Amino acid sequence: MLDLIGIGLIAFPEIDPILVEIGPLAIRWYSLAYIAGLVFGWWYLRRLMARPGAPMSPTHVDDFLTWATIGVIAGGRLGYVLFYNLPKFMADPMAILRLWDGGMSFHGGLIGVCLAVVFFSKRHRIEMMKMADLMAIVAPLGLLTGRLANFINGELWGRTTDVSWAMIFPDDPTGLPRHPSQLYEAALEGLVLFIILQILFHKTRLPKDKPGVIAGCFFIGYSFARMTVEFFREPDAHIGLVDGISRGQMLSAPMLVFAGWLIWMGVTYKKRKGGQA
């Protein structure tokens, strides 16, 4: 047990997870986080694609919003089912459809969006690696809003600690001070990664000369950010740790291999295109 004497706790800002409730209709911060991430990503990409020489048109961006939404929701839900709680959903398959009960996986949602990029780019004859770079530069926006929503909901909290910025989360039955790991993730996976990718996209020739490298950098940045924060985040109670490794770290490590392939595709782009940029 931690000795609470001398620990300078920060009060958890209790915010109602439901923003607006009208009869049976409830608008939750968590749902708004997904909507905000998708809409802001759509708006930002649409502005970029209005420039001359863009690899996609604004109309393509409009159309892909639907594909991305399906990829995020379907992939995120199926990822949670497969990666985090398969026995529960095998016993009650209809629970898979009860999205309002919670349970989404970022890794599953990412797989869903990646598949959407593959099929959409082939259907519309868009260079897949250039489209992948575009999706990569807006993905941290969704991570930022999603982790902030986790914090507002008081869920996915961190491990017990005695740091001065520790918090006691209202739904935590132990009542012990914990790392606000949701904010760590929002900062690293969201804000910091977004800034880095913007610099690479706007201040270098990578998007033109080596498409795929920026997408690879996103996967590397996310993987290291997630694996780092997992050391401060409380493991899922029904999964725990395996040899000191969390499920989030297990799922993030293979992303580094995929990142290597994306970067290799970018580095060899001119050679594969016969020297033409």
Image (cartoon, helix red, strand yellow):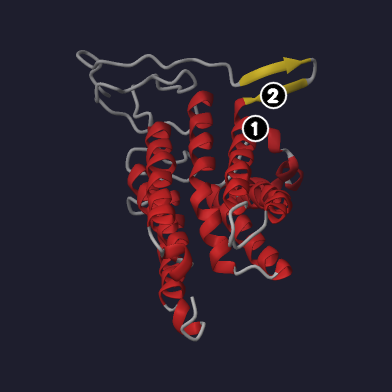
Q: Is residue 246 visible?
A: no
The amino acid pointed to by label 2 is: Ile
The residue depicted at 49 percent of the width and 15 percent of the height is 14
> Residue under circle 2?
27
Q: Is residue 70 visible?
A: yes
For marks 2 and 1, give the CA distance: 7 Å
Local SS, label 2: strand
The crowd level at tag 2 (other Cα within 10 Å; few <14, some 14-19, many 20+) is few
The residue depicted at 72 percent of the width and 41 percent of the height is 95
Residue 74 percent coordinates (x, y): 69, 50
Local SS, label 1: helix
Is 140 placed above or below 59 here? Answer: above
Residue 89 percent coordinates (x, y): 67, 47
- Mark 1 and mark 2 in contact (Cβ < 8 Å)? yes
> Residue under circle 1?
31
Residue 86 percent coordinates (x, y): 61, 51
Decide if residue 229 is on the left or right side of residue 162: right
Q: Nearer the viewer, residue 82 or 167?
A: 167
Q: Residue furthest left?
A: 6
Q: Which mark is residue 17?
A: none
The amino acid pointed to by label 1 is: Ser
Q: Residue furthest front?
A: 52
The crowd level at tag 1 (other Cα within 10 Å; few <14, some 14-19, many 20+) is some
Q: Nearer the viewer, residue 153 or 46?
A: 46
Is 269 placed above or below 256 here? Answer: below
